[in-house]
Image (cartoon, rainbow, N blue to C red):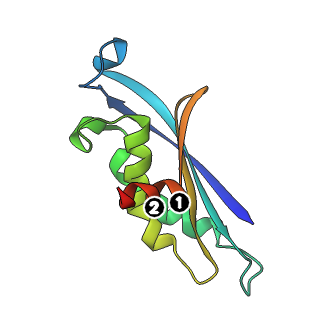
Amino acid sequence: MKLRKEFTFDAAHNLIRYKGACERLHVHTYRLAVEIEGTVNDDDMIIDFCEVSSLVRGKVLSMLDHAYLNDILEQPTAENIALWIWERIDEPLKRGNCALFAVSVWETATSSVTIERGDVHARCAE
């Protein structure tokens, strides 16, 4: 089974290695989805939604919401934001019955990136 929890946050950024409109300072209302894959535990849940919310708010949204993302990431593309989020929540979400499966970040309603566990393992092997 896969459990999915979604969040939004507002942040500004500019892409320093990009030629075009996005190299200038601009703002997005980002959408974030965290997917956890696992089996149900003794409470008949993969993991408590409230626990996921608390962890994501504490480790991610507290730093990204209403922030200038270039202060956190040199090149804050959706890809780099998704990887940064993955690195902050992967270990804390691991349980005997479940683990982080995917992180998706939308910059707009129609533009998103998804990183999955296999992508992270492939990146580490390089």
Q: Is residue 94 above or below residue 76?
A: below
Q: Quadrant of the N terminus?
A: bottom right
Q: In this rendering, would 99 be left or right of 46?
A: left
Label 1 – label 2 distance at C-alpha: 6 Å
Say what amino acid the circle numbered 1 marks: Arg
**Which residue is denoted by mark 1 in the rendering?**
117
Numbered tag placed on residue 46 in the rendering:
none
Q: Nearer the viewer, residue 56 or 17?
A: 17
> Residue 107 appears at what percent x and percent y?
49, 31
Residue shown at 23%/38% (left/top)?
Answer: 74
Residue shown at 34%/30% (left/top)?
Answer: 12
Residue shown at 52%/75% (left/top)?
Answer: 94
Q: Which residue occupies the extreme top position in the image?
A: 20
Q: In this rendering, would 107 be left or right of 65?
A: right
> Residue 11 appears at what percent x and percent y?
38, 34
Numbered tag placed on residue 121 in the rendering:
2
> Residue 24 appears at what percent x and percent y?
28, 16
Q: Which residue occupies the extreme front position in the image?
A: 126
Whether tag 1 and tag 2 are in contact, CB under 8 A, the answer is yes
